Image (cartoon, coloured by chain):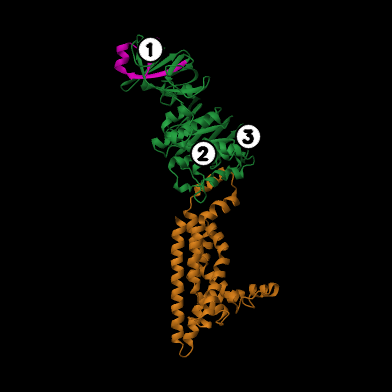
Chain colours: A orange, B green
Amino acid sequence: MSGILTPAESEALLLSLRVSSVAIACAMPFAFLAALFLARARRFAGKSLFDGLVHLPLVLPPVAVGYLLLVVFGARGPLGAWLLENFAIRFVFSWTGAALASALITFPLQVRAIRLALEGSDAALGEAARTLGARRLDRLLNITLPLAVPGIVSGAITAFAASLGEFGAIITFVSNIPGETQTLPLAIYAALQAPGGEVEAARLCALSIALALVFVTAAEFAGRRLRR
Amino acid sequence: MSLEVSLRHRFGAFALDVSFVARGKVTALFGPSGAGKTSVVLAVAGLSRPRQGRIAVDGRVLADTAAGRFVPPERRRIAVVFQDARLFPHMSVRDNLLFGWRRAAAKADAATIAGVVDLLGLERLLDRDPRRLSGGEKSRVALGRALLSSPDMLLLDEPLAALDAARRGEILPYLERLAREARLPMLYVSHQVEEVARLADEIVVLENGRVKVQGSVFDLLTDVDAAAGVPPLGAVFEATVAEHRADGLSVLAFDGGVLYVRRLGRETGTRLRVRLRAEDIMLAREEPRAISANNVLPCTVKAVRLHGEEADVQLRCGATRLVARITQSSCRRLGIEPGAAVYAVVKSLTVEREAPETPASSTASS
């Protein structure tokens, strides 16, 4: 890889992959629970509110999400100060902050895919499991979860692909630090800001396109395989 | 066993008000679609909660709205075989079969598991993907899965309704064998008289959400009275294999005489159920001679019921009741009326032949 990519480029690529993997993996259990709640809970006012809240990152400008993260998780923010003081966890100016921002932005994508799978899976199977002695948690782990796997996988891959392109929330929340928070889109932006950086920007752009194509194809393939 | 059901519920315009106590080993819940059969099954299984009512199996109260008691389905030990099988698509047939077994408090031992696999001919299906099974195979797996969960009772909600005649013929011998061999009480939902005649001991007839009539299968299916709520089949009675004769016939003794049938693969002394269709019984005023039919039974006419072009003639042969369906013109011509002595010529009858051995041979033997 070093033959084709410069060290800085492969650093940005690997950082992008790491940030997105961690973001999607950490958000997945929460996305499953949120989807389960939305698919199963009866209609009530709080449910619509929760649904709106989950979808907020999809409609809000990413810069606004980044700003809100800064307010909450910044060194002087309520949660940020508490985490720093008690656990020495710092999100600002760190790649983990980039992952947090990506996780939040792509959260609705995961929730939507899992929710669709849950709503499409047959409630009658849960009834059959009940008559065979399976209790609630048992049914969740052995019937609901395995049947939702296609949705979980396709949601994760779509969210991962979207996460690779995240820019606004990351640059606002954790800034543009090479090697720490400078993912591919941020590297493209930095290259464009530098005099004579057009060639570098074009190379990074091509890299992004290749990466996106790989993951969209993977999502398609995994979706088809799992649905059989 | 005893199953006590008393339910009151409203679904929109449909009111369910059902109350019965079933003591048969196999009780059939019979009636046209929309009569409320499935509602009763769901309530007994615990999958629906009646607005008002009480359900008890052998004195164990599963639901009692007056006492605020409701045992959830996962703790009822009542297995259900649904019409659409409901196999878990993400598990092999083996894991489907063992799903309830793994969760049962009193687990069936290896010999019992092998027995169920054998009874239902599941051996070569164990590693298959349930989504790739035929309709009949799915039903068998669903039945095996229910049996292995060691239930106190088995509910079968029209398990054959989704199958064509051939597949139905493939499953029925298994159910028949199960009904005879298993000590498990069953509630069998059906709207097929033939199925009920083959499997049930007792029938509860539902109509418009109410119990119309309840009684033994031997009485209800051999009664010309339309109020019975079930079209009469002809005759259903138990007989004993008395003898295998050298001429290739077997002799069945019943309460009213003997029947000759083609050689049966059953030991003498075996009790089995005989079914005759009303259309397959001809009547004669004098004893017919030189006739190909093997079975001619002397009977007394008890009642005649006319409907349409036909006449259903209630007969008695010893202690056994039969119904013959003839045309009204024959009825007049022969002067058939209550008290008349007639001979019933049996054109064909059905007995449980051999117990099904393998799935391949069972298709033909039904």
Instruction: Return the residue nearer the eye: B68 or B102.
Output: B102
Tag 1 secondary structure: strand
Residue type (three-letter) at the residue carrying disc 2:
Leu
Q: Position of residue B228 (x, y in %)?
A: 44, 24
Q: Position of residue A152 (x, y in %)?
A: 51, 61
Asked whether, in this view, residue B224 is left or right of residue A153, the answer is: left
Q: How far separated are the C-alphas under marks 1 and 3?
A: 50 Å
Q: Is residue B247 above or below residue B98?
A: above
Indicate yes or no whether the magenta region holds residue B341.
Answer: yes
Q: Amino acid at mark 1?
A: Tyr
Residue A67: x, y in percent?
Answer: 55, 77
Residue at mark 3: chain = B
Residue B60's label in the rendered image is 3
Residue occupied by mark 2: B143
- Kindly state the secondary structure of the residue where label 2 is placed: helix
Callout 2: chain: B
Position of residue A109 relative to residue B106, above or below, is below
In the displayed structure, B61 sits above or below B250; it is: below
Report the disc number at residue B343. Answer: 1
User: How far, Cα to Cα, is label 2 from label 1?
Assistant: 43 Å
Q: Decide which of A79, A133 is in the foreground and name it.
A: A133
